[in-house]
Image (spheres, helix red, strand yellow):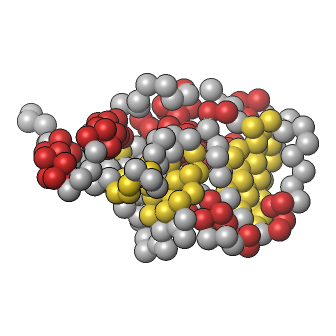
Amino acid sequence: MTADTRLPLIPQAPEGLSRRARYFVERHGLRVPHRDLTLHREVWLEQGIPDDEIDRAVAFQELWGGLALPPAPEYEGGPRVLEADVPEGSAGSGWRFSAGGCRVSMAYGFMIGPGGEFGIDADHWTPLHASTAGWVEALALADHAGYWAKTITKVKGGVVEELDLDGFEPVPEVQGLADTWWRGKDSLIAVYRGEASGFDAPYCLRAHIYDGLDAWGLGGT
């Protein structure tokens, strides 16, 4: 029987992800056709885009391009498919490129920053995680915690600032910047500050609290 090449391929998780994130990518993700950005190099060079920035976009595309993952808990689900595009910026402000199109109409886009940060381009650039791997780790942890938690509580605005994180430790693999995950004795807390920071709007603060987790639920690695 001839294979149907129109079907999306099961993705192979990039190196360096946790076991939990690798399982998430390979079990729940799809790899769909994506553009070869090397074909645009000459045109982009003529537009004044530095060769190093084109290399960054090409490297992202080769590693992450075409990867479709389940929706994120916030940011209206995040990018529909991870996909790089033409770099934009300058030497003074730093160069960024798209991380993929939005699932719904949004007031901002998802971008990869000068240092490889994954973030949103709202009223101003706001890195959420130090890398795309951190974003994927956060997606995987949300999926895992959501499955195993006995209760999930969502809070917003000033209530987020009142959360008691004494005794909690940051979850390092998500490489949190504006967004962070915290692990306690039997709970996980995800704090989403991206929209609040990107729009200078404290009422956009969000947090999800996953309670009633056992040792496996807390880690899954």
Residue appearing at x 88%, y 60% in the figure:
162
Residue appearing at x 54%, y 70% in the figure:
123
Residue appearing at x 53%, y 34% in the figure:
21
Residue situated in front as seen by the camera: 200 or 35: 200
The location of residue 72, given as percent across then percent down, is 54, 55
Residue appearing at x 40%, y 43% in the figure:
29
Residue situated in front as seen by the camera: 141 or 36: 36
Q: Quadrant of the N terminus?
A: top left
The location of residue 169, given as percent across then percent down, is 80, 35
Tell me: residue 13, above or below residue 39.
above
Horizontal side of residue 43 vs 120, given as left or right: left
Horizontal side of residue 56 vs 51, given as left or right: right
Residue 197 in sight here? yes
Residue 72 in sight here? no
Identify the image quadrant of residue 30.
Answer: top left
Q: Residue furthest front?
A: 92
Q: How many marks?
A: 0
Q: Quadrant of the C terminus?
A: top right
Horizontal side of residue 65 vs 146, given as left or right: left
Q: Residue furthest left?
A: 2
Identify the image quadrant of residue 208.
Answer: bottom right
The location of residue 41, given as percent across then percent down, is 17, 45
Tell me: residue 21, above or below residue 103.
above
The location of residue 59, given as percent across then percent down, is 31, 36
